[in-house]
Image (cartoon, helix red, strand yellow):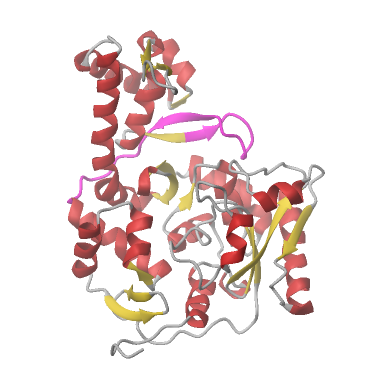
Amino acid sequence: MGDGLRYIGAPERRARLATRQRLAGTARAGTPEEVADALVALHGSDPATVYLAVGARLADPSRTVPETERALYGDRTLVRMHGMRHTVFVFPTHLTAAVHASTSLAVAARERAALLKDMAKAGAPDAAWLKEVEESALAALARRGQATAAELAGDEPRLKERFAYAAGKSYEGVHTVSTRLLRVLGVEGKVVRGRPLGSWTSSQFRWAVAPGHPELDAAGAQAAVLERRLRACGPATEADLVWWTGWRVTDVRRALTAIGARPVSLDQGTGYVVDGDVDPVEGPAQPWAALLPALDPTAMGWQQRDWYLAPELRPLLFDRSGNVGPTVWWNGQVVGGWAQRAGGEIVWRLSPTADVGREAEAAIEAEAERLRGWVGTTRVTPRFRTPLERELAG
């Protein structure tokens, strides 16, 4: 490319994605922990996404639900918590200390300050009162093991205290202390989301005391998280990394320097890989297809997506806030979308510009049957609906 750097084109980037993101048939994982380790983080704001993302990558998807529940709520080897960009993710438990130190502490300070400011404006009790309520609520949660906000409010009635916010604004409303405080405690790493109240698709959940972890240096934690990210998603541009982490540009650059990241040339400009990852990577021997859910970490893995997502597909597959819907993949490229109908049928449609051939269509249909086989009639309507998904779902 004229800059003296090793060039990594779109075909090689797709080859890396196939194996490192556990999507090619020969690269599929044995457990949810292997999937989470490979991807660093699974989007957790929509509970069904976690299971669907795991199921798409397991060699035996029939074990998706019990094995993911075991990892999340039995062995606690996976934890659902706030992380990058103030978003709820599922992380491997061994990574939570680094995520907390690299990202959550700064966000948590802003969240607590905002809560205290809103309470003060509304004439609600002060910080000392809030601290007392917090300690009482955490003690109650420790006694219970897991509890809903309502159950905790039964143990600590002051959690029911209500206060107005944004008075006079178009979005004014009323918050309870429990709603805001539990959110702050979650970002601070003191509580995590626990077992849902209903099935694995339920958005109602219990809270649990967060697993203990050491306090790490912020810069060192950022370096550790960024290295894991590049091993999973490299090469990535600086813009990709700033977008995914939510950090300042200076933080990303410092972390890249700390891990000795190597620059490479991409069609999108300069990208980075971890030291030792510059050599060419061959793709899987067999072509592959995948049906990935809304908010899947692969589809959402990079800010600059033209190397795997045709621009004309964006209006169909993304909502107005930038959330991706269910996607159909063929050999490292998004070629269409899918949805589930009321009776459980998995339906999919290719982009008019995706001339993939009969082999691809047969492989995609096989993936649809594979998905239907383990999901059954459980409804998996995405939390964030997108145009093509709505149309296909009927």
Residue 215 position (above or below residue 349): above
Residue 204 position (above or below residue 343): above
Q: Quadrant of residue 290?
A: bottom right
6 or 372: nearer the eye? 6
Q: Is residue 6 magenta?
A: no
Residue 199 image position (x, y, % from top left): 64, 35
Q: Is residue 200 magenta?
A: yes
Residue 216 position (above or below residue 357): above
Please give the range of residues in magenta.
194-217
> Main SS of the magenta segment?
loop
Task: State the residue at coordinates (77%, 56%).
Answer: 347
Residue 339 image position (x, y, % from top left): 71, 52
Left or right, residue 131 beside residue 289 = left
Residue 324 image position (x, y, % from top left): 56, 53
Residue 126 position (above or below residue 43): above
Left or right, residue 140 beside residue 361 = left
Quadrant of the drawing holding the C terminus: top right
